[in-house]
Amino acid sequence: MDGVTVVTAVLNEGENIGNFMRSLDSVGDVQELVIVDDGSTDSTLETINSFKGHYSLKLIRRDRKMGTVSAQIAGARQASSEFVVVMDADMQHDPSIIKILDEEIRKGYDIVIASRMVDGGASNRPPVRGIISRGANFLAHLFIPQTRGVRDIMSGYFIARREIVADLKDLRDSYKILLYIFASRRGLRYTEIPYKFKPRSGGESKVVSGLDFLLRYLAELMHYVRVEFNVEG
C-alpha cells in the first residue's frame, strides 16, 4: 500500500465523525482509515457504518473507555501501510496537512510532528489552555531528556513509521502517545512542521482541564519517566 493509514480514536463523536471521514476524501495520500471506538453511545457507530464500502475502512469496537493511547496502539496494529497518521476526529486537526506529513516522512524520518509551537504554527485555544500546554511541554522536557528537542511534545497529530506506534506495549488510561513514544525509544529521527490547531466544530471536548488535568498529566508523566524501551519483542 503506497499511501498512508489514518488512525483515530473516538468516543461519542457523532457530531463530527461524518465530516471528518468526508474530509479525508480530498486527501489522496490516505489509502486506509482505522477507527477505534471506545464504547460510543451516540450516533458515532451508525455514521461510521454508513461509510463502509466508501474506501478502505477498519472499525475496532471496544466496549469501554480504555484511554486514547491504548486505542491508538490498537489502531496502528491493524494498519496496512508503512506509515500511520495519528490524529483526532473532532476536526481540530487539519486533514490537508497529511500530504505534507507524508512528503516529509519519506525523506527518512521516523516521525514527523504537526506542531503548534514552531514558526507558522498556531492554536486557537483560550490563553489559559495555551499556558497549560506550554507548562506541560516544559515538564516533559525537564523529566524526559529525549523530548527536549521537540517543541510540541503535547501534539496529538503526527505521522510515524507503523512499528513506532504498533510495537509499543499497550497502556491503559493514558492520553499522550507522542510523549510515550519518545520516552520509550532512543535515537528517533524526527522533525516538526507547522499547523494551525482549529476550534472544535461540534460535540463536547474530552479533555480534562484545570487541576484535574494537571494531576492526571503528572501521574502519566511520572509513569513515562520509569519507562525504558517499553516496546514489544
Image: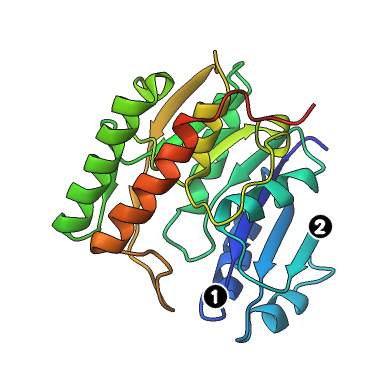
The Cα–Cα distance between marks 2 and 1, rounded to whole angstroms, is 20 Å
Q: Residue 233 at what x, y percent from top left?
A: 80, 26
- Of residues 76 and 117, which is closer to you in this image? 76
The reply to whether residue 207 is in sight is yes
Split into 4 quadrants, where in the image is the N terminus? top right
Q: Amino acid at mark 1?
A: Glu
Residue corresponding to mark 2? 56
Residue that appears at 78% across and 35% down: 2
The local crowd at label 1, few if under 14, some if 14 to 19, many if 20 or more residues have their Cα within 10 Å, is many
The local crowd at label 2, few if under 14, some if 14 to 19, many if 20 or more residues have their Cα within 10 Å, is few
Q: Residue 133 at what x, y percent from top left?
A: 27, 47
Residue that appears at 45% across and 53% down: 94
Residue 104 lies, with reference to residue 152, above or below; the image says above
- SS of the residue under disc 1: loop
Residue 160 lies, with reference to residue 61, above or below; the image says above
Q: Residue 20 at what x, y percent from top left?
A: 56, 66
Q: Earlier in the sequence, mark 2 or mark 1?
A: 1
The reply to whether residue 55 is in sight is no
Residue corresponding to mark 1? 13
Residue 205 lies, with reference to residue 197, above or below; the image says below
